[in-house]
Amino acid sequence: MSMSRRAFLQTGAGATALLVVAAAGFTPRLGLAATEPAAAPDPRKPFQGHTLDEVVKAMGGSNAQQSSEIALQAPEIAENGAVVPLVIESKLPGTRMIAIVSEKNPHALSAVFNIPEGAEAYVMTRVKIAETSKVTAIVQTDKGFFYTDQLVKVTLGGCGG
Amino acid sequence: MADPMRIRATLTGDTVEVKVLMSHPMETGLRKDADGKLVPAHYIDTVKASYNGKDVMTAEWGPAVSKNPFLAFRFKGGSKGEKVTVTWHDTAGDTRTDEAAIQ
């Protein structure tokens, strides 16, 4: 059966309308994706760093100084590197951020905690440590970056899950 | 959908201590399964805790946080019976929110 002219036009118009809708639906989203990273600095970028310096630099700082005002509680020997309990407390005034770095992990940065005003500079958590290495607590205050570290010996690596 | 979090918030003096235990595999993307295939990365990347509509803690995590993550933090100015809300978001796009009353 051959298609009448009217039917042909109707289906054709429908298909075009669909195409227009599809195009309209996709282009704004593409535009949004392109502008988003420029609006805010990427919080995931520090996670690419492999050393303490790289991580601090990616956070927008430089020359982190050692400080005895940061208390890092970590076990000296961790039997299981997949679960290493850490307690970090900062007595530095104006602490805004606490981060955990273990340099021998595939990616040095483990976690970042933002401390809003009114919250205490205290964090307790558990992280994975691949092999015996220094664990570093980075603290960002209004005056810059500070750190303290402790060696944690791992008898069973954290990569096994 | 992921299992609920276990949250305990206790008031001591004027400080609220919040302890959170989440249920999550936290796959690093580097581990291999029994067939030698890489297990794709699947971990919590952001955590947010709020009290009275105000953030009391936000965190960015990498895959190096332990499986079934435990987290404790403290903030000032909470009162008994009020609720603390914790939300996480993972790399698979999953998200979960739970709340607990301050004791």
Image (tube, coloured by chain):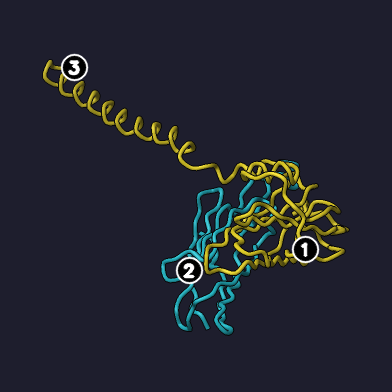
Chain letter, yellow in picture:
A
Above or below: residue B29 compared with residue A75: above
Residue underneath mark 2 = B85
| x, y percent for residue A118 | 52, 69
Have a look at marks 2 and 1 and say if they share a chain.
Answer: no
Three-letter code, disc 2:
Thr
On the question of residue A75 being in view, the answer is: yes
Task: Give x and y (percent) for residue A55.
Answer: 69, 45
Nearest to N terminus: mark 3 or mark 1 = 3
Mark pair 2, 3: CA separation:
65 Å
- Depth check: give the residue in front, B48 or B23: B48
Q: Amino acid at mark 3?
A: Met
Colour for chain B in the figure: cyan
Q: Residue at x 67, y 52 (%)?
A: A145
> Residue B102, labelled with which disc?
none
Instruction: Tell which tag, 2 or 3, sits nearer the viewer.
Output: 2
As drawn, the label of residue A1 is: 3
